[in-house]
Image: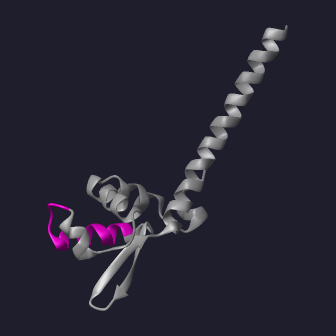
């Protein structure tokens, strides 16, 4: 199976590394409610504003968030590209597992009929 990067132009390692950090997962959860500036995000965490910016940079590199300049602020929002690519990549595993489960069920049914 090809990695996400080769299929969707999204780096699978960057996505999973980004989501492997609990602070970044919480940032994603906060942005799930709507766009926020760096300052607004920093108010919600017990870490510095520069640390929030570094976390956002990692999330942006993984195509999970993007920012729009708004005057002197950057407003961040979720980026569907990274989530869609990751969902499709993970979905392929689900599709394969589901197909195998159907084969097992069919084999059990066939044996029961014998």
Residue 10 visible from this viewpoint? no
Residue sitting at the far right: 114
> Can you say whether 63 is above or below 23 in the image?
below
Tell me which secondary structure the magenta stretch mostly adopts: helix
Residue sitting at the far front: 33
Residue drawn 59% across the image and 44% down it: 93
Q: Position of residue 67 (x, y in %)?
A: 38, 79
> Can you say whether 104 is above or below 111 in the image?
below
Q: Position of residue 1 (x, y in %)?
A: 61, 50
Quadrant for residue 50, please give it. bottom left
Counting labels gives 0
14 with respect to 92 (left or right): left
52 inside magenta stretch: yes
Residue drawn 55% across the image and 69% down it: 9
Magenta stretch bounds: 45-59
Quadrant for residue 37, please give it. bottom left
Q: Position of residue 97 (x, y in %)?
A: 63, 36
Q: Nearer the viewer, residue 84 or 104?
A: 84
109 with respect to 48 (left or right): right
Residue drawn 30% across the image and 56% down it: 26
48 with respect to 20 (left or right): left
22 with respect to 66 (left or right): left
> Can you say whether 106 is above or below 44 in the image?
above
Residue drawn 51% across the image and 67% down it: 80
Q: How is the image coloured?
A: one colour
| Quadrant including the C terminus | top right
Residue 81 visible from this viewpoint? yes
Residue sitting at the far bottom: 71
Q: Position of residue 66 (x, y in %)?
A: 41, 75
96 inside magenta stretch: no
């Amino acid at each position: 199976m090809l990695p996400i990067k080769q299929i969707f132009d999204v780096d699978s390692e960057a996505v999973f590394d980004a989501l492997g950090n609990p602070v970044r997962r919480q940032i994603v959860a906060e942005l799930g409610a709507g766009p926020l500036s760096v300052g607004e995000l920093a108010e919600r965490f017990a870490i510095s504003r520069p640390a929030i910016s570094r976390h956002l940079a990692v999330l942006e590199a993984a195509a999970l968030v993007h920012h729009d300049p708004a005057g002197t602020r950057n407003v961040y929002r979720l980026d569907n590209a990274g989530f869609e690519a990751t969902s499709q990549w993970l979905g392929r595993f689900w599709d394969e597992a589901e197909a195998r489960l159907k084969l097992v069920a069919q084999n059990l049914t066939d044996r029961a009929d014998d």
